[in-house]
Image: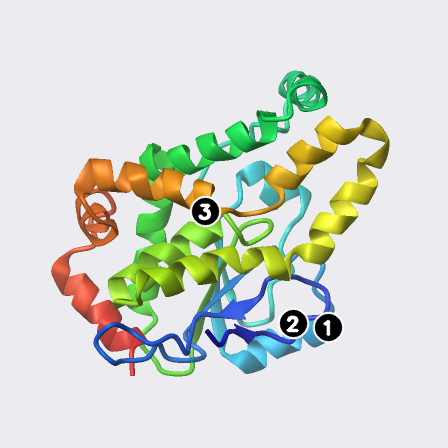
Amino acid sequence: MKQHLLDIQQGFNFRDLGGYQTKDGHQVKMHKVVRSGMLNNLNDHDLQYLIDYGVKVDIDFRSIEEQESMPDKVPAGVRYLSDPVFPKDATKSNEKAALRKKAFLNDPKAGYENMLQSYKDIVLSPSAQHAYRVFFDELLANEKDGEAVLFHCTAGKDRTGMGAVYLLSILGVPDDVIRADYLSSNKHLLLNQQNKQKMYQELGETFLQNIEDLTRVCDEYLDTALDLIKAESGSVVQYLEDKIKVTPAQQAKLKEIYLN
């Protein structure tokens, strides 16, 4: 499975979703949709690179707190759109942060359980369903070839990962390819994971296990979301129709815009 990494120096997990083959023999167009981690550290080379790449819209799935504490560096001429999947960053209040730290020090499964709950919330919470509806509205408006929508969260793996799962499902990319695209965040985030491990080294093995679970993706996280989606609607595409209100006509238009 060939992936198209963008040449970004001060960011991670920047990937063009183009190039994937669909089940019916089409191919996702290049320079149309980019998934990534956050844009707060981009240098001048990166900003110019994204302009030259054709990025026209920057969709930010992070909470308002995350957006304010680490604002995107938005390339000139690119429209920024705040589109939080979760209304609040639950880790930011001092009381919750203290409770979370205590759990992470004592319970080796706390990070893993935290992630499973996040994926349930991505599927079921009204704020997430609204955010993905806005995401699809932007994708539907992105009609010109060579013009790209970029969408991201913090690491570009969970909220962004599910956005990619949703779009690629509608476009008819095979499930195993969609899963491989989702899981490849681990490879592209390895340096980020190692840096986090170094930061928390002195807090012990249990804490480090929890940090590892927070900074990776795995089959169980994706399956938590997919199992819920299937229970709700039977399939990803049917869920998008039922809950995100992406109509069959809009699905056909997305194929027109994003497939060769």
Give the label on residue 52, or none. none
Task: Report how far apart the C-alphas of labels 3 and 1 lie in the structure.
Answer: 36 Å
- Does residue 193 sit above or below 150 in this rendering? above
Foreground mark, 3 or 2?
Answer: 3
- Image quadrant assignment for residue 255: bottom left
Give the label on residue 44, or none. 1
Which label's residue is closer to the chain start, 3 or 2?
Answer: 2
Q: Which residue is mark 2?
A: 47
Q: What amino acid does circle 3 point to?
A: Asp
Q: What amino acid does circle 1 point to?
A: Asp
SS class, disc 1? helix
Q: Which residue is mark 3?
A: 219
For label 3, the crowd category at 10 Å Cα-Cα, with few meaning under 14, some 14 to 19 and many 20 or more, is few
Is residue 152 in view from this perspective? yes
Task: Report how far apart the C-alphas of labels 3 and 2 lie in the structure.
Answer: 33 Å
For label 1, the crowd category at 10 Å Cα-Cα, with few meaning under 14, some 14 to 19 and many 20 or more, is few
Asked if the residue under mark 1 is in contact with the one under mark 3, i.e. CB atoms within 8 Å, the reply is: no
Instruction: Name the side, left or right, on which 85 lies relative to 103.
Output: left
Is residue 82 in view from this perspective? no
Residue at (59% x, 62% y) in the render: 13
Residue 65 place in picture, x, y as percent = 59, 37
